[in-house]
Image (cartoon, rainbow, N blue to C red):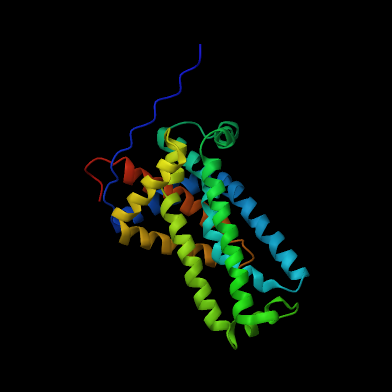
Amino acid sequence: MAESLPEPARLPEPAALGTADLISALKAGLADFVRAPLFGIFFSLVYVLGGWVLYAVYAAAGQEWWLAPVAVGFPLIAPFAAVGLYEVSRRIESGQPLRWRPVLGVVFAQKDRQIPAMAAVIVVVFLFWMFVAHALFALFMGLRAFSPGNDLVTLFFTGNGPLMLAIGSLIGAGFAGVLFAVTVFGLPLLLDREVDFVTAMITSFGAVRENLAVMALWAALIAGALFLAMLPMFLGLFAALPLFGHATWHLYRRAFTPAPASRA
């Protein structure tokens, strides 16, 4: 007899969010990071090591300036560092013990659920962004952009460099904004409830649309923090990714599991 599949979870309407919710989420995220710092450092390590590898590759080719589109596109893929952090926050919230094996077990179990499908969408968008970035470099800088040994300051801040940087940043922000809208609550939903990835993306987009100003501020905080975190050889990601990963889980809880009347 075939085993019956779990009934899809009924999703509540998203709650209205305010700046007080962002502050509360950040405080709760910081508390989770302080309580379980090794998990945050571990899940951030992949991205820090990846940044070092990219820097080494581009530096060896004399094309460090290619790190600029990678930096702009980083917020597209950063949410996946947070999946493990969501599980840590969920366990702290529910009073479950924090042990490596069950936490990693939940993370690895996602391969059989819907998160890989969302990952495929995000990877495709990130690769398309990199293609657009290459096209912008070629359009504004010509063959000069692909010549080794270019100085970053000279390349970006002379000639067509400032215009290219401005237009590229706006386009990259557009890509990041769309993916932020469908993943900021979509990924926690996939971890927390039995929903398909399309439903999770649509639900997340709807919640962001209903709280547009607040979520735009949240996106700006995350993008700014991640950009600054990458400046000191990506080392700042050890703090920024865990803080905002844990905090996003708590913001998700405030949006889809309203707390009692004490909520701001």
Q: Image check: 34 left or right of 101? A: left
The picture places residue 175, in percent across and down from the top left corner, at: 48, 62
Q: Image check: 63 left or right of 176? A: right
Q: How many marks?
A: 0
Q: Image check: 260 left or right of 26? A: left
Q: Image check: 30 left or right of 109? A: left
Which residue is nearer to you in this view: 198 or 19? 198
Outermost residue to the right: 60
Quadrant in the rendering for residue 93? top left
Q: Residue at left 54%, top 52%?
A: 122
Q: Is residue 68 visible?
A: no
Which residue is nearer to you in this view: 89 or 122? 122
Q: Residue at left 46%, top 41%?
A: 197
Outermost residue to the top: 1
Q: Is residue 33 visible?
A: yes
User: Considering only vertical position in the picture, is 143 above or below 192?
Assistant: below
The picture places residue 18, in percent across and down from the top left corner, at: 28, 56
Outermost residue to the bottom: 159
Which residue is nearer to you in this view: 109 or 237? 109
Q: Residue at left 61%, top 67%?
A: 232
The picture places residue 249, in percent across and down from the top left corner, at: 42, 45
Which residue is nearer to you in this view: 89 or 32? 89
User: Considering only vertical position in the picture, is 108 above or below 25?
Assistant: above
The picture places residue 146, in percent across and down from the top left corner, at: 71, 76
Q: Residue at left 63%, top 81%?
A: 141
